Each structure stands twice: as C-alpha cells, then as structure tokens.
Image: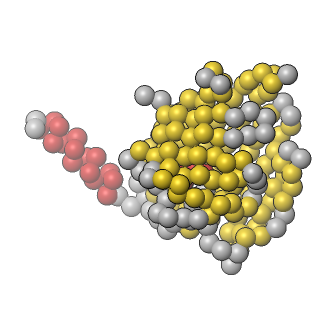
C-alpha cells in the first residue's frame, strides 16, 4: 500500500471513530407495474451515535383510467432499536396526506390523515421494525411490523428463508432479502399491484 493510500485509510478510520460522525448508505430501486417502469424509490440509512435514520422516497406516475402521480416519503428515527418517530408525507393528484407515529413517555401517539382513512389512537408496545428499516435489516423472527401510513401494527410472517409476507389491511406484500437487505418487494394495492427491485 502506498503512503498516500495509507494516509487516506488513516483519515477515514479517524473520521469514523469521531463521536457524532454519521455514516450514510443509499439504495436505489426501480418500481414497475405489469413489467412497465412507473417510477423509482431511494432508500437511505444514516447512523450517528445511538440514532439511526431510515428514509424511503418514491415517485410514481401511471395510467389508471386517469393519470395517477404519487410522491411518497417515509422518515423514521430509531434510538437503540426503538422507534422514536415515523412520518409519512404523500403528495398526489388525489390530494396531500400525512401520518405520524411518535413515542411519548410510555406509548406512541398516532395521527393519520390519509386518503379516505383517519386514525388517532395509540400504540403501547415498543416498535422495533417498520417498512423503512426492513430495506436495510433482515428482521429476526418478528411477528408484527408498523404500517406507517396507517399507524397500525400488522402481521409479519417469515414464510420461507429470506422472505417475509406482511399483511396490510388485506393486501399481502412480500419482501425478498439478499445479504440481509431487501432486493425485491411485491406490493399489493387496491389500485395497482407493483414491484420494487434493486437497481443493478
């Protein structure tokens, strides 16, 4: 190894060791419906001290009797594997919607204002996994997961090795893992089923 490479390696190691320094990972996915590309999703994970931020940001546009355009963003914050807050913002030509799940003392406060759906309840148990975290970390035998945009815990079933099925309001979504991270997902939706696949 050259002196320059050793110097660079030393600087990188030092930066990663400094308290407060963050590490960011990004994964980009294509979104398709019936084999046609309709959009893209970017998943990111950032860690800093004891906190981890997970985000999903997707934009899709497709024809379903009329043109449907949706901008969907999830931002979740964990501390030591405990969800602190998760927020979903949806902008579409059907309207703008928002949902939030926030930890307050001994419970989560849920505030969902969605498309033909509202939820203002609470969740008592600690949440360890939501959809955004799944894209970066294979869950160890969980049975429920947070459906962020509904503000509810839904069944999660490890149906086979590296495959989870998640039932969201009757829609069974399947997540396929490779090396501990999602590389493909099949999402069922009342309007249009679609597939999310990691770009090469």
Give percent across and percent down for residue 68.
79, 27
Give percent across and percent down for residue 170.
75, 51
- In the image, residue 116 sits, relative to residue 100, either above or below, namely above
Give percent across and percent down for residue 59.
67, 31
Along the line of sight, which residue is nearer the eye, 39 or 12? 39
Residue 76 shows in the view: no
Residue pushed farthest front?
A: 160
| Residue drawn where x is 65% and y is 61% of the image | 155
- In the image, residue 193 sits, relative to residue 169, either above or below, namely above
Residue 13 shows in the view: yes
Give percent across and percent down for residue 65.
85, 22
| Residue drawn where x is 43% and y is 28% of the image | 200
| Residue drawn where x is 80% and y is 60% of the image | 111
Q: Determine whether, in the image, residue 104 is placed left or right of residue 175.
A: right
- In the image, residue 159 sits, relative to residue 37, either above or below, namely below
Q: Determine whether, in the image, residue 95 is placed left or right of residue 40.
A: right
């Amino acid at each position: 190894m050259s002196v320059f490479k050793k110097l660079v390696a030393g600087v990188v190691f030092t930066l990663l060791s400094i308290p407060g320094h963050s590490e960011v990972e990004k994964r980009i996915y294509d979104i398709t419906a019936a084999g046609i590309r309709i959009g893209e999703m970017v998943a990111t994970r950032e860690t800093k001290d004891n906190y981890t931020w997970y985000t999903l940001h997707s934009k899709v546009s497709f024809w379903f009797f009329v043109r449907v355009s949706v901008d969907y963003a999830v931002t979740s914050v964990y501390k030591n594997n405990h969800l602190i807050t998760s927020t979903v913002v949806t902008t579409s030509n059907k309207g703008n919607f928002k949902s939030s799940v926030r930890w307050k003392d001994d419970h989560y406060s849920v505030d969902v204002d969605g498309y033909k759906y509202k939820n203002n309840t609470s969740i008592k148990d600690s949440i360890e996994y939501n959809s955004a975290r799944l894209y970066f970390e294979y869950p160890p035998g969980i049975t429920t997961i947070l459906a962020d945009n509904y503000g509810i815990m839904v069944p999660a079933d490890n149906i086979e090795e590296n495959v989870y099925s998640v039932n969201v309001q009757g829609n069974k979504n399947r997540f396929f893992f490779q090396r501990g991270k999602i590389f493909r997902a099949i999402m069922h939706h009342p309007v249009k089923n679609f597939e999310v696949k990691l770009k090469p």
